[in-house]
Amino acid sequence: MARTFVVTAREICNKCGGTGYVYHPRWEQYWLENDGRRMLAQDDVDWFRAQGFDVSSPRDLPPEEIVCPKCTGNKVLITRGIPLEEALKELGVEVSDVC
Ligand SMILES: [Zn+2]
């Protein structure tokens, strides 16, 4: 039986752009609803409390950035087990050229 070859692809995470962090979804909503302006500290607390967060002071607010859920902070996405033919095709190499 002939051997089969598979490759591993490594690419910059397209969700965080390779930083490993993304905005907390609620903070994104906060900035959208407030036209990019920060409210007073107590208004922030009230806004997050209305979103279901258990906050009583500005210190309790969730962090604005969280670890990217797609790459789990690794900054890159690794895909293993890609058939060689598929990888070559994506690279623009005709499989008939090499087989
Ligand atoms: Zn990421």
Image: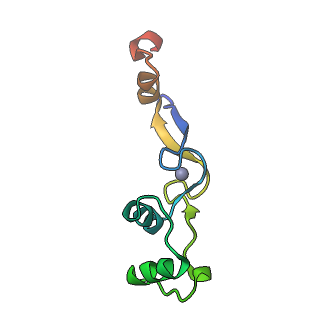
Query: Quick one: 10 or 94, which is closer to the camera?
Result: 10
The image shows a total of numbered marks equal to 0
Query: Quick one: 15 or 78, which is closer to the camera?
Result: 15
Q: The C terminus lies in which quarter of the figure?
A: top left
- State the colouring used for the structure image: rainbow
**Residue found 48% across the figure and 62% down from its top:** 37
**Residue found 39% across the figure and 12% down from its top:** 96
The residue lying furthest to the top in this view is 97
Query: Quick one: 90 or 44, which is closer to the camera?
Result: 44
Residue 32 % position (x, y): 39, 60
Tell me if residue 98 comes above or below residue 60 in the rendering.
above
Residue 72 % position (x, y): 56, 58
Residue 8 % position (x, y): 55, 38
Residue 17, quarter of the rendered image? top right
Residue 38 % position (x, y): 51, 66
The residue lying furthest to the front in this view is 40
Tell me if residue 36 comes above or below residue 55 in the rendering.
above
Query: Quick one: 52 or 45, which is closer to the camera?
Result: 45
**Residue found 49% across the figure and 41% down from its top:** 81
Tell me if residue 70 comes above or below residue 79 in the rendering.
below
**Residue found 45% across the figure and 16% down from its top:** 93
